[in-house]
Image (spheres, grey):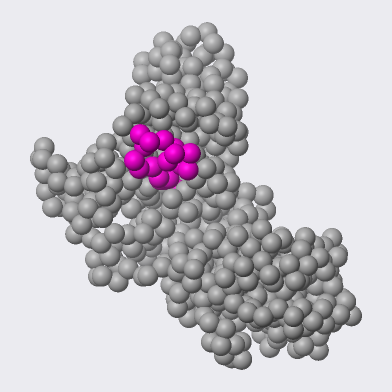
Amino acid sequence: MLNQHIASLFEELADLLEIQGANSFRVRAYRNASRTLENLSESAADVVATTGRSLTEFEGIGQDLAQKVRTIVETGSLPQLVELRSQVPAGVLQMLRIAGLGPKKVAALFHELGLATLADLKSACIAGRVADLKGFGKKTAQTILDGIAHAEEVGRRMLISIARDSAEAIVHDLKQLPTVSQVSVAGSCRRRQETCGDLDLLAVSADSTEAMDLLAAHPLVENVISRGETKQRVRLRSGIELDLRVVAAESYGAAMQYFTGSKEHNIVIRRRAQERGLKLNEYGVYRGDDYLAGRTEEEVYEAVGLPFIPPELRENRGEIEWAEAGSLPRLIELEDIQGDLHMHTTATDGAATIREMAEAAKARGLKYIAITDHSKRVTIANGLDAARLRQHWRDIDRVRGEISGIEILRGIECDILEDATLDLDDQVLSEADWVIAVLHYGLKQPREKIMTRLLNAIRNPHVDAIGHPSGRLIGSRPPADIDYKTFLQAAAEHGVMLEINSCPSRLDLNDIQAAAASSLGIPIVIDTDAHSTSGLDDLTYGVDQARRAGLTKRDIANARPWNEFQKLLAR
């Protein structure tokens, strides 16, 4: 029973309770518990089942919620949730996927109009019943009608790589307008979350009409959903929705802080403002009616007694305490990375040769790389057996003798097989400069078998790192069921490095696990897993993930110069 699954049940329970008009404090308790569970670095199921500890030791989980977690772990379900599902049709929950419809509005549609499906909702909008409902009106009804066809797309979160590319392309074009003096991405995209549900842009412009006209006509925009004097919402051709807000210059910093979030971080910041007799909102910091600050985020944080907090840390996971103590970490930067230790060539399923990958890495300023083509188990990728691998290494030797200015390691991405053995024997692995062991198959095996496989790999003296440990593909393939506490302890004890895989659909380790690994002193490697020269540019997403984990240059093994990394390899 994964933490994410339990968290999703609590989030669904909160939605259903809010639709049913339950007490707001009760609803908030479930949402807070959901977030706590999602952010735990250890398994809630293990805490319940094996350690004898109580979940009440975690913030936001009291006796009642702890008992509900136990019920979910032991039975796989929760009677309260089953009962609420019987009272609220599934189609009602689907309405929450429509932009602009929160639980309160959905509750009105369900209770007052008796709408139970998206089809019912569409018919009611066309008939004018929704427009006549108090708190809705014709404009809202039309917005709902427009959004029904896209409910599935809107409900789907988009990979950060796609979301960021779209947002930054629009920001770039807005900056070309002489009337736009400032424009930036905000929201979860700025915090570099793994996925984004929507996008937020903030701008300062002498002519908001011109800025909105450009956005409306932008080639990435499918249609305009709504438009006012200072706010416009559009749907991009990719399916994600984007809000552009034009704000006053004196409010830009406050708006950036407010709309960057996260909500949990902002609640603490507003509370600090209140404790100082101040009012903080998206317009600025005020004492009474007197404006004090808001042009920059630095001003906003200074007003509440804190230094500027990097957006990637704003999740209320300890960053406030770090800031208070003056111990905010100096987060890893893309420029700090010296090497990339996971990439593929035409020897297996890559699109570029050894030489092309090495030259592309050198052009990007890297000082060392490892060529890590697949082992033989990955037949779909033309994986290498011992004979082909040794020939491949001879090819690497030849290329590295011909290219100066970059070290090229003879590596292998070696599969950890379903029977817990490695895909190549120890004699072959002992000849490698770098071995990264991975799970590709059998990811649905029970935890006991997954852990046996991972622990056997960690104990192998020739394995240098475990790559993309959970094997997940964000949004399409769930992670393997790993006991992270045991996994991380084993990696620390055996001196095995762990990877943050920069591929945007992987980002594995996640930020919670990476932070836990770093706290145990485990060296982290940020790799691209590139299958082409352009794939080397994905390194930025791995660095973002490390920043969300609060990691510094000191925590990242391949941020070390080559001579220091060599010492780490010698271990």
Residue 154, compared with residue 553, is above or below; it is above
Front residue of this view, candidates 552 and 457: 552
Please give the count of numbered marks on the rendered protein.
Answer: 0
Q: Is residue 186 left or right of residue 526?
A: left
Q: Residue 265: horizontal and vertical position, in percent?
A: 33, 53
The quarter of the displayed image where residue 541 is located: bottom right
Q: Is residue 179 magenta?
A: yes
Front residue of this view, candidates 53 and 387: 387
Residue 454, compared with residue 256, is above or below; it is below
Q: Quadrant of the C terminus?
A: bottom right
Residue 102, compared with residue 168, is above or below; it is above
Q: Residue at image x 45%, y 74%?
A: 553
The quarter of the displayed image where residue 508 is located: bottom right
Q: Which residues are magenta?
A: 171-188
Q: Residue at image x 68%, y 76%?
A: 370
Q: Residue 28: horizontal and vertical position, in percent?
A: 36, 44
Q: Is residue 372 magenta?
A: no
